[in-house]
Amino acid sequence: MWFRNGYTEAMRCVAIVAKPQKEELHQILPELLLWLRAHGYDPVIDDVGGTYTQEARIVPRHELPNENPELVIVLGGDGTLLAAARVFAKSEVPILSVNLGSLGFLTEVRLDELYTHLEGWSKSCCGIEERAMIHCELRRGDELISEHEALNDVVVSKGAIARMGDFRVALDSQLVAAFRSDGVIISTPTGSTAYSLAAN
């Protein structure tokens, strides 16, 4: 038995985040749901996944962390993974990302390897790779306008105004650089991989 929030539960929750407009998910999702249930998991899918099948509980994506899943399965490409990482940024839930796109820098698991990885997970014999994330806040004076979490990068740019901006970059309140430019990209090690590859 697994215990969560003081209640005994026979089934462990697994959340599924799906990419929109991927017709193959009409076949992939029902098969995945059958596998999860056969191995004692209670699958819950995001509202995008709910457009492909009605065979599991459907929860809005931003509310999935409230289900306390022990694993998140992302079916899509790097964009879907980045969206899922933002949603689960404040939790410690591992994410298994399955590449359904043409090119995935971050989604390394191929579809034909999905069940091999899930078998390893269910037997607690797979490693977890930890990734750093960035917390970003937009402030005007003392007012917090918005805040975001990012697995890849944070971009500060000029927007629609066609002029350069003045930027100051500091680490722990120590000035690192001051310059004029179109913008600044602050990248995690995860994001820097894509920039390195793009720059050859």
Image (cartoon, helix red, strand yellow):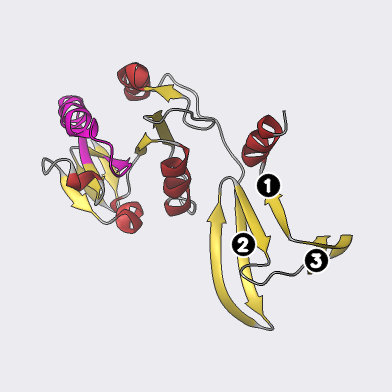
At horizontal 33% and vertical 16% (from top left) the residue drawn is 112
- Give x and y (percent) for residue 42: 20, 38
Mark closer to the chain start, 1 or 3: 3
Q: Which residue is mark 3?
A: 167
Q: Secondary structure at mark 2?
A: strand
Mark closer to the chain start, 2 or 1: 2
| Residue 158 to residue 90: above or below | below
Mark closer to the chain start, 3 or 2: 2
Single out the mark in the foreground, 1 or 3: 3
**CB within 8 Å, label 2 to label 1:** no
At horizontal 19% and vertical 50% (from top left) the residue drawn is 58
| C-alpha span from label 2 to label 1 | 12 Å
| C-alpha span from label 3 to label 2 | 16 Å
- Give x and y (percent) for residue 34: 15, 28
Q: Secondary structure at mark 3?
A: strand
- Give x and y (percent) for residue 150: 56, 52
| Residue 37 to residue 163: above or below | above
Q: Quadrant of the C terminus?
A: top right
Label for residue 165? none
- Judge from the rendering whether residue 17 lies leftward or rightward of residue 23; answer left or right: right
Q: Secondary structure at mark 1?
A: strand
Q: Which residue is mark 2?
A: 136
Label for residue 187? 1
